[in-house]
Image: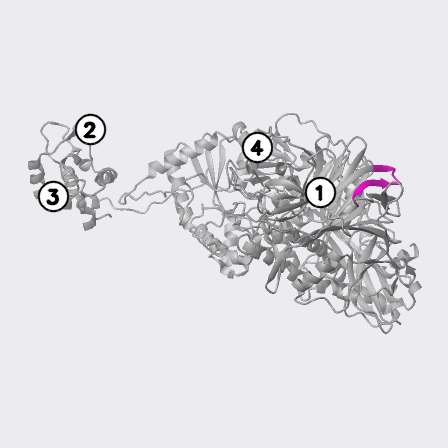
Amino acid sequence: MFFPTPGFFSPSENCNDNFFPLVGDHHTPHQHYLTGVETLKLVFMLMCQKEILESIAMVDTWLTRVNEPSLLLISKPEYRAKISAKSVAATMVNAAVVFAVLVAAIWVAESEYIEYNTTQRIVPDKINVHLVPHSHDDVGWLKTVDQYYVGANNSIRGACVQNVLDSVISSLLEDKNRKFIYVEMAFFQRWWRQQSKAMKIKVKELVNSGQLEFINGGMCMHDEATPHYIDLIDQTTLGHQFIKEEFGKVPRVGWQIDPFGHSAVQAYLLGAELGFDSLFFARIDYQDRAKRLKEKTLEVIWQGCKSLGSSSQIFTGIFPRHYDPPDGFTFEINDVSPPIQDDILLFDYNVQERVNDFVYAALAQANVTKTNHMMWTMGTDFRYQYANSWFRQMDKFIHYVNQDGRVNALYSTPSIYTDAKYAANEYWPLKVGDFFPYADHPNAYWTGYFTSRPGLKGYVRVMSSYYQAARQLEYFKGRNETGPNTDALADALAIAQHHDAVSGTERQHVASDYALRLSLGYEEAERLVASALASLVNQRLSSHRMNPVTEFQQCPLLNISYCPPSETMLVNGKSLVIVVYNPLAWKREDVIRIPVSTTNVFVQDLDGKKIESQLLPLSNATLTMRKHYVRAYTGKAPGSNVLKYWLAFPVSVPPLGFSTYTVRSSDQSNDSSTISKMSSPEGGIDKSIKVGQGNLMLLYSADEGELTHYVNSRTLVTASVEQSYSYYSGNDGTDKDPQASGAYVFRPNGSFPIKSDHQVSFSVLRGPILDEVHQQLNPWVSQITRVFKAKEHAEIEFTVGPIPVDDGIGKEVITQFKTTMKSNKTFYTDSSGRDFIKRIRDFRTDWDLRVNQPIAGNYYPVNLGIYIQDSSVEFSVLVDRSVGGSSLEDGQMELMLHRRLLHDDARGVGEVLNETVCIADKCEGLTIQGKLYLRIDHKGEGAKWRRTVGQELYSPLMLAFTEQDGDNWSHFAASTFSGTDSSYSLPNNIALLTLQEFKNGKVLVRLAHLYEIGEDNNYSVMASVELKKLFPDKKINKVTEMSLSANQERVEMEKRKLDWKVEGSTDEPKVVRGGPVDPTNLVVELAPMEIRTFFIDFNPLQTVSEAENHMANYQSIQ
């Protein structure tokens, strides 16, 4: 109830006799008598409040709501009359009495409890507005994941996910009709662990009733441009397994609302192959959105994989604007949207006004939406910290909007919405390809993050491959819940796939937190690996009655040439034993390199035979980086030994197994490894320097030391190739458009070549295993090009940094390869390391592109590789981490390697992308060392190299070291192991993605076909895997095919699959997939691009005890 206060009646200087229009008597307009209500109005006016007109309107509305006919006001102008001074004076005599009577009359209309009808219903002949309550909770961005969870560091942002979940659960329990979706299991798992048994029971009831629904269900909402597809599978599996174990539920919907562009792999692999019925997201190119809004094509059927076609398509919805509600419908405590005020005794009663707002917003969205169902995403970043502020308003809107009857509103979820769309029985447009690149403004292409924080991107990739190998060894050893395991590394890798983590778009302290978690996870996994290798080795040594190996050391800083075990001087007859583990399920031959401190060493293989080895001096750039970064990472400088050489030697390793090699000290120089010879830069008659002693040869100009030609003597491919470095200056946003280049956005402001200074910048090292070309372009850019005798591709190791910015210009460093190929504006980039997608310069398949940024607008994410082709050859470049890449001219390819910028791009992170490394009080820009791999083939023959080497790059050989006394080395060297049958290796077009033992003893196995349909004449065909030979030592009880995340049986998933109708022609070749696994033969078939996931139950009481025999057979056939 409102009671006027003394301040309410304060006089106004602006009051006068002309300011008092009142309601006239409608019977005798010329002779006026004041009613009690008019008297009250007069009292108000005579007291002259400054905003008197508003007060009159307020009283009008107030009394109307009381619904007392005797007090209703007539406000038509023709009934208004002036009041004489006499009438006023007479009226004032009774003012107090009239006011008291009026208040008493109004008091009869009490404010009562309103029971809001929020029952869920769909009305077929109306617009149905599905209100989907949600909170988008970044698993790290401006704050770390734990800071976001507990609400710490709120000076950056007041966000507390713990409050969100507490508050939401409480609100859901108050009303069974309310609903909420939750996405990020990294947060929910933290919250769940802290709940009482009683609360867990209540939450499970909410989940079972559908009030609380898990959407997406991974540990995070992963990025789609920069992660590898195996990491995406793993992080999703981790979340889905948690949901299955705790709640017995299977998520139905993909919810990628915030990633900055969307990959084809997301649609078919992390969508349809998970059993999702639909996928929703917000961010697409602003030009694409405009066209789709106009044509009502925001909802499509997305076929992300040409090989799997319609068998792996998914209904996909794009939000009309963003992932927040329409304007005027956000209801966090501090939001400015007007709430529904439905208390008749309070001012600002606005039910009809807000209902009208709701209806108008619904009608506006109906104009761009197909069918009579639309979704409103009721929430945004870190909302519902006080959930009642949202649910109270949504309760009211549903109640009053449905009373109004023009549209129908309901609490909903994306699953309910998807079912409604499916029930509409509509035809939907078909979408193929992906949604890259993404721009939200003519000069704002979000293509810089493809490369941002290259150090973190490289670290995530290295840890990912290590995790795969560690899981395999955990399986071979047997999972032990009490000992070291891979769980911590799995968790760290999972949240590192977040769209503000590996993407490089987080603040620096958050990036450091991700790296710290990876490091801690690695430390535990490293102990597991050492223990597993020791166990497997000791099984072999026991037959020789040798002392068991107690310790294996590994070298996580080998990338900066630091490996204490291999750098130790071998004295007193000691030998360095190297165990080389191969995580691939095919036999592998490669060259490994380790740093050593002396030239007096040689290498022996597992048979005790001396093998060819080569010593290569470290470059100055390598030594400088080693010295600085070892101190930065370990807190101390490298050991007193002056490291001078890499020791390189060939290895041969069985599938899913290891071989051992021994490095020994040599007393005689003629027994030692070959020291590489430094060649003169002078060229031959044709003024060119030839590098390479095998089938591959690279030619360099003698005058400038630049690459000129690529020659393969076996394939007879000869091509002109040039390589160069340059940088784009980052736009500082000071021109007409204030858009700067930053962590997300790539907006170049000119390109500048990085030239060699011609002073000792080019040298060639030659040896029996490989040749190296060392080039120092300037003080902060250098590279080493390696040509191996036994390989037909070149390896380029680049070192970039610290990028100088003392000139006030941010720089984005690229390397370019130029050929004479006629590539017709066309190039190909991979989708998350899986399918290759055709790109055409300055062109989009779905709309007529207006070119505003001809460089940034043609950049695409590269996780595996990029290639171009013409009528005769194809040129491929593979990468060791996510980068941005393009082909801006015919015959040219470029890759962005490093970025250091001085301005924020105004996309929310609020911090400049300027990474530094500090020792004591001295900081300098980050230096990056990475690798590129290049090869030129005849057209149609490059896929085999891209797929095979690409898999080897993702899963490098794992090295472990131990010292042995001289008397023991020969027996130790004979130690070898393979997890497969001695005569068996997976086909060349099949990869073992996952070999993991679960807590329940079941073993998860994933097998992937590596080729697309039509990609290779020999390998784009059906292939098969013999499980009995893959697991020769165990008796297989049962094989159950599962969905990709192993949370439901595949056959059940297929039964529930929705069959959507697609506009246009449905003619397509019949999609063929691998058939069911026969329980007797146990052979798995895989069609091109197919990934199949299985749980295998082994009989614990029956094993095939042939470990010794089949390894002996393996050695005998070498």
Determine whether label 2 and label 3 are within 8 Å by CB.
Answer: no
Mark 3 or mark 1, earlier in chain: 3
Q: 1100 and 375: which one is in front? A: 375
Q: Amino acid at mark 2?
A: Pro
Q: Where on the picture, by quarter, is residue 31?
A: top left
Establish if 29 lies above or below 458: above
Q: 136 and 894: which one is in front? A: 894
Mark 4 or mark 3, earlier in chain: 3
Label 2 and label 4: CA atoms lie apart by 53 Å
Which tag is nearer the camera, tag 2 or tag 3? 2
Horizontally, residue 478 falls left or right of residue 254, namely right
Determine whether label 1 and label 4 are within 8 Å by CB.
Answer: no
Callout 4 secondary element:
helix
Label 2 and label 1: CA atoms lie apart by 74 Å
Picture coordinates of residue 1038, whole percent (x, y): 74, 51
Label 4 and label 3: CA atoms lie apart by 66 Å
Mark 2 or mark 3, earlier in chain: 2
Query: To which residue does mark 3 refer?
Result: 95
Quadrant showing the C terminus: bottom right
Image point (84%, 37%), residue name: 718
Which region of the structure is painted magenta?
Answer: 705-718
Which tag is nearer the camera, tag 2 or tag 4? 4
Q: Amino acid at mark 1?
A: Arg
Label 2 and label 3: CA atoms lie apart by 24 Å
Callout 3 secondary element:
helix
Query: To which residue does mark 2 refer?
Result: 77
Q: Is residue 308 visible?
A: yes
Query: To which residue does mark 4 refer?
Result: 288
Query: To which residue does mark 1 refer?
Result: 834
Label 1 and label 4: CA atoms lie apart by 25 Å
